[in-house]
Amino acid sequence: MVVPTLIDGDVNLFQSLAILEYLDEAYPEPPLLPADPVARAWVRGLALINVADSHPLIVPRVRHYLTDVLRVSDEQRLAWIQHWLGAGLQAIETLLAEHPSSGGFCHGESPTVADICLVTQVTPAMTFSVSLDPYPHVMRVYHTCMAIPAFADAHPSKQPDAE
């Protein structure tokens, strides 16, 4: 099974962005993507920094390959993880600082797919001890999101399989 997976009745979907877009289309309120095509593309682009650029490089499958096959040390593996999380956070930080429509959220005044993906960039950064001081715009959005019960309740530490 590919993770993440969503099973919704007869629907069996996989991969974060596909699941998020399905949820936006199947359950349109509240919308997860802006109506304006330019804003929608911007939100998707911001989300893809995490979904396509950073997160795939730190998943357990990659971490195990680094350790088990390439035999990198724990310190080298941690440096790899911190590098790629930091690179993604820096890209998001730069874009948020330049984006006139970012405020409490990545775009506009309600959460979007970009905010969901931002939270899933910050959470492992905290887990792997990445300094978050250089990312004030990212952290503003993160804290705004985490004040929403749906975000707070979805935190990995609150899941049934949390260790």
Image: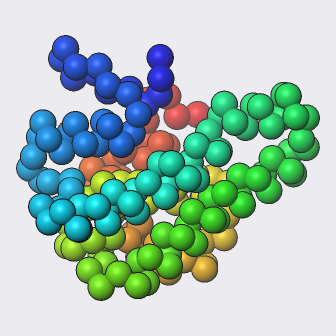
- 59 up-or-down from 8: above or below: below
- Residue 86 point in image, percent of width and height: 64, 65
- 90 up-or-down from 9: above or below: below
- Residue 64 point in image, percent of width and height: 75, 31
- 59 up-or-down from 13: above or below: below
Query: In front: 46, or 144?
Result: 46
Query: At 62% from the left edge and 39% from the top edge, which residue is drawn?
Result: 59
Query: In front: 44, or 149?
Result: 44
* Left/right of residue 57 with respect to residue 146 in the rendered view: right
* Left/right of residue 154 with respect to residue 52 in the rendered view: left
| Colour scheme | rainbow
- Residue 144 point in image, percent of width and height: 33, 70
Q: Residue furthest left?
A: 29
The answer to which quarter of the image holds residue 104 is bottom left
Query: At 71% from the left edge and 58% from the top edge, which residue is drawn?
Result: 82
Give the position of the C terminus as an image quadrant: top right
Residue 84 in view of the camera: yes
The answer to which quarter of the image holds residue 33 is bottom left
* Left/right of residue 55 with respect to residue 39 in the rendered view: right
Query: At 19% from the left edge and 14% from the top edge, which residue is drawn?
Result: 10
Query: At 41% from the left edge and 34% from the top edge, which residue is drawn?
Result: 15
